[in-house]
Image (spheres, rainbow, N blue to C red):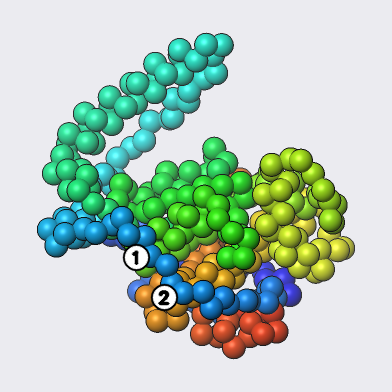
Amino acid sequence: MRVGLRPFLRSIKVSILGSSPLYKSECSKSVASTTTISGSKLKFSGIEQTHLGFLNSSKSNLALKLKASREGVGLVQETKMDPPNLIKKSKDGSDSFTEMKQRFLSFKKEKYLGNLECYQELAEAQAPKFLVISCADSRVCPSYILGFQPGEAFVVRNIANLVPPFENGPCETNAALEFSVNALQVENILVTGHSCCGGIRALMGMEDEENSSSFIKNWVVVGKSAKSSTKAITSNLSFDQQCKHCEKESINHSLLNLLTYPWVEERVAKGLLSLHGGYYNFIDCTYEKWTLDYQKSSQKHEKGGYVIKNREFWQ
């Protein structure tokens, strides 16, 4: 069944160095809702847990990376932002790189040299608390929108922020997933989608069983289960409305796909890892966040269902 949005929580940005939750409720107690949604049946593999052997940090490096991660780099400040000076297209690209050069030099002077100790600690090792799986769309950079600072989030971006199931085999997204979970041991995975997603529109516009040489279509077919469930409950809606629904539905199916990776499911079951969904609407600049309820979802996955909790609406 479809889940309606219920705005009830307004959040403000936290300007404390190194805080992992980037937003803090104005209320002393946040309101949470738990919702059951239809989802694809989970399949768990018995393959043994794999580990990446190239991150063998010493105790000193561990201390450094924890300090750098927890303290942050001191860049979150309550300052008035000037209108962005967007890079303009040019025939030879020279103007674009002139602007890019100035941005880099400004970053080095104002941020890097201004917080040299923190950046030097980050140069030794990283200990992010988040893996963020986001769309490659140029309008939805998660570090810019959610305020992640260097060392806070390991980020992988692809078309339509999709997570393929374990059985699909290796790709750059699950390579980043394996490294961040097994080596960096992140505590949270956030799959964040957005409004007006071209990848989801391509998915919804595909014919069933369509054979195509398009790299895009062969990638977005990963979301076919989200497309099917969307079509089943939105058949009376317009194509645009169906796409909007699938933008969120695909996030939930990606959360389910994360649980098909044995080393992800193991850490979630032990309470060491949490799976979250997020949706950025850049038309009115709102953000919706929710968390997969693993315990209740485990009871329902045989019937193809799952449960989400801690739904918040930031505006």
Report the residue at 73% width, 60% height from top: 224
Q: Residues within 10 Å of mark 2 (few under 14, many from 20)?
A: some
Q: Is residue 182 above or below residue 310?
A: above
- Disc 2 to disc 1: CB gap under 8 Å: yes
Specify the amino acid type for callout 1.
Gln
Q: Is residue 49 left or right of residue 113?
A: right
Asked if residue 73 is positioned above or below residue 182 in the image, the reply reads above
Label 2, secondary structure: give it.
Answer: helix
Query: Which residue appears at 69% of the width and 51% of the height?
Result: 220
How far apart marks 2 and 1 lie (CA) works out to 9 Å
**Position of residue 256 in the picture relative to residue 222 (left or right):** left
Q: Amino acid at mark 2?
A: Arg
Question: Percent from the top left, x then y, of residue 26?
Answer: 37, 65
The residue beneath circle 1 is 185
Residue at the outermost bottom position: 299
Q: Is residue 21 visible?
A: no
Decide which of 215, 87 is in the foreground and name it: 215
Residue 265 seen from this side: yes
* Residue at disc 1, secondary structure: loop
Residue 189 in picture, x, y percent from top left: 45, 63
Residue on which the image places disc 2: 267
